[in-house]
Amino acid sequence: MRFDFEDAKTFEAAVAGCTSMFLMRPPAISNVRATLLPFVDQARRLGVGHVVFLSVAGAERNPIVPHHAVEVHLARNDGAWTVLRPGFFAQNLGDAYRRDIVEDHRIYVPAGAARVAFVDVTDVAEVAARVLAAPQAHDRRGYTLTGPAAVTFEAVARVLGEVLDREIRYEPATILGYARHLHRRKLPLAQIVVQTVLHVGMRWGQAATVDPTLAVLLGRPARTVADYVRAHASTWDARSRLPPG
């Protein structure tokens, strides 16, 4: 059925009959107070008892990111909730970085010598499913979810090269050079700013912290970034079709 965070008339039908909900903020929505928060309130009124919210690592102490306001809203109001705070996704290698890897045989970001605890979204999804299946055990809990080790982009490039059997290099970008690169890729200005700020922040360890919580919740070791690369090698096949632009 039709659902739109920016159209309150679609809220009721979307949650009718639901007792729990997985909530994720679309990247295009920054004003959560006019969208996600009213939706959560309407869902509560219609019988949704447990909300599992996909936030981001560090959002609980960073009021700048939109996820913070959603976390605060859930905590201040009645009803069960669980917040998942994943770190930097391994899947960025197959999305934001894919074209550079396929066409230029490189990872090109302004992260310097940063280490990153890449997390596989497959693991995050499994945690969300486990929480929804046994909500009482996770009521009003927040979980930071990272991969099992913090690795450099240079190390990731080596893994890509070994798996793909061709040289892949990590080329640290300058801030201006990276912004120009994304502009040539025809990315929107807002996305250029976000991606640049995100990667520059990594230079000061913003994505380097390793948290053991994910493995505890899964009952097994979390997937490594190398596991992700090996499982999805065809993603960077030079013969695969790339989006235009």
Image (cartoon, grey):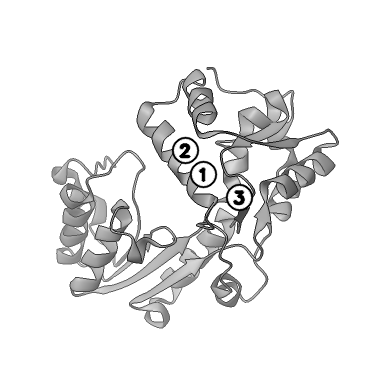
**Residue type for callout 1:** His
Residue 24: x and y in percent read: 36, 53
Quick one: 122 or 92, which is closer to the camera?
92
Residue 227's mark?
Answer: none
Residue at figure coordinates x 60%, y 59% from the top left: 117
**Residue type for callout 2:** Thr
> Mark 1 touching mark 2, by CB under 8 A?
yes
Give the alpha-carbon distance from disc 3 to disc 2, as whole Å: 18 Å
Residue at figure coordinates x 58%, y 57% from the top left: 119
The tag earlier along the polypeptide, 1 or 3, is 3
Count of numbered marks: 3
Residue at figure coordinates x 44%, y 25% from the top left: 187
> Horizontally, is 155 left or right of 185 in the view?
right
> Mark 3 touching mark 2, by CB under 8 A?
no
Give the alpha-carbon distance from disc 1 to disc 3, as whole Å: 14 Å
Residue 199's mark?
Answer: 1
Q: Which residue is mark 3?
A: 90
The tag earlier along the polypeptide, 3 or 2, is 3
Work out whether residue 52 can be spotted. no
Quick one: 203 or 121, which is closer to the camera?
203
